[in-house]
Image (tube, grey):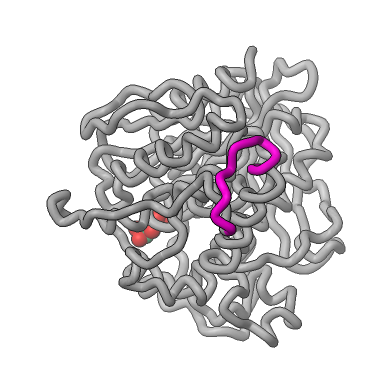
Amino acid sequence: MDEAQVPPFVLPELLKAADGKAVTSKDDWRWKRRPELLALFEQEMYGQAPARPPLAFAVLEEATPALEGKALRKQVRVFFSGRKEGPAMDVLMYVPATASGPVPFFWGLNFNGNHTVSADAAIALPRPAPASSGKPRLKPLKPAERGSEASRWQIEAVLAHGYGTATAWYEDIDPDYDDGFQNGVHALFPEIEARRGGTTWGSLAAWAWGLRVGMDYLVREPWCDAARVGLHGHSRLGKAAVWAGAQDERFSLVISNNSGCGGAALSKRFFGENVGGINTNFPHWFCSNYHQWKGREPDMPFDQHQLLALVAPRGLLVGSAEEDLWADPEGEFLAARAASPAFVLLGEKGLEAHWKRENSAISQGNPAHWQRPGKHDVTDQDWERWMSFARSRWGK
Ligand code: GCU
């Protein structure tokens, strides 16, 4: 990965509609450009998801004191079929024990099971994935230990700031391997699978759909102040969070952490992971139309700044890590900056900073970008920045 190899590139227009007309007002954005860009990303990249089911859930655990009295915990199974059966995700929630009413929530998927986000021994273990009629996994899932990813969740710190936190295991929604879309939520829609084509949803769209089903639950959850839900995701789950947040305006802010190619990073910089590589290594992530852009980044009629712009005027924080060159920190920053005119059009401050290779400061305004030293990960420093950004949006 060599910065000198980055080709000259021109980004597709953000504030010009497909008919060539300039987008100059909030109404132009809302009624014309935003729907047009959403359709573009749906058709060319992530694929089209079906309507979400009517909410169906079962309480697995009622409010229970947890974390040495600092929290209340609750666990709820949210079904994807609209009935209390079939594929479902288990949502784990904590709120501060001192909360006297609904609190703002952070909501995000985890990589290895709810039991990894805290050492709390009462967290239900993941259920084994249902037997699949598709291809078997090449590698069995690694058994993950309780609390093994606690540093990525910082639950005590989140609670100390007065926020709630909710998470579910992403493989409850769709197991992350190429099985020909036979398992997970794809299997719930045989009529869609029967005519799978270029714009049919892949796994990222399924995870994003699951995040939105989770929001369908959170708006009904008495613990949650549904007007202040921050959606966050790291890496592939950051890609899913950005797509869900772009589509669903109920999320008051969106945090993309190290989401890289197919997430916050510009594809046309062709630095780090690229469209060919990601589709070869993860053929099930995107819709098959996206595969046609393999090696053709210069010809792509869209790029990720246009996706980030769909979050406007809600809060957007793009997080990078200095050593995470695979995700292209500079490409993530430049995408956020190139998305900024849509935020400004909608009355936000925008992102005016210039790129710095070593830049551990958060840029002010919205969208915001933050880069910390270190590797691809989620750290306590990230969470402190996310929460100060949330505080700037949500108030006390
Ligand atoms: C791989 C992949 C990335 C992805 C990452 C992750 O590195 O190439 O696109 O973001 O896995 O999800 O951890």
What stretch of residues is rendered in magenta? Answer: 19-29
Q: Is residue 134 above or below residue 215?
A: below
**Is residue 272 in view?**
no
Task: State the residue in front, 285 or 164.
Answer: 285
Question: Quadrant location of residue 163?
Answer: top right
Q: Residue at x 68, y 68 (%)?
A: 185
Spot occupied by residue 357 in the image (x, y as percentages of width and height): 21, 34
Question: Quadrant location of residue 129?
Answer: bottom right
**Left or right of residue 107, residue 52 in this image:** right
**Is residue 7 in view?**
yes
Spot occupied by residue 241 in the image (x, y as percentages of width and height): 55, 48
Q: Is residue 99 above or below residue 289?
A: above
Spot occupied by residue 149 in the image (x, y as percentages of width and height): 45, 43
Task: State the residue in front, 65 or 339.
Answer: 339
Q: Residue at x 67, y 56 (%)?
A: 210
**Left or right of residue 177, residue 246 in this image:** right
Q: Is residue 25 above or below residue 33?
A: above
**Quarter of the picture for ligand 1?**
bottom left
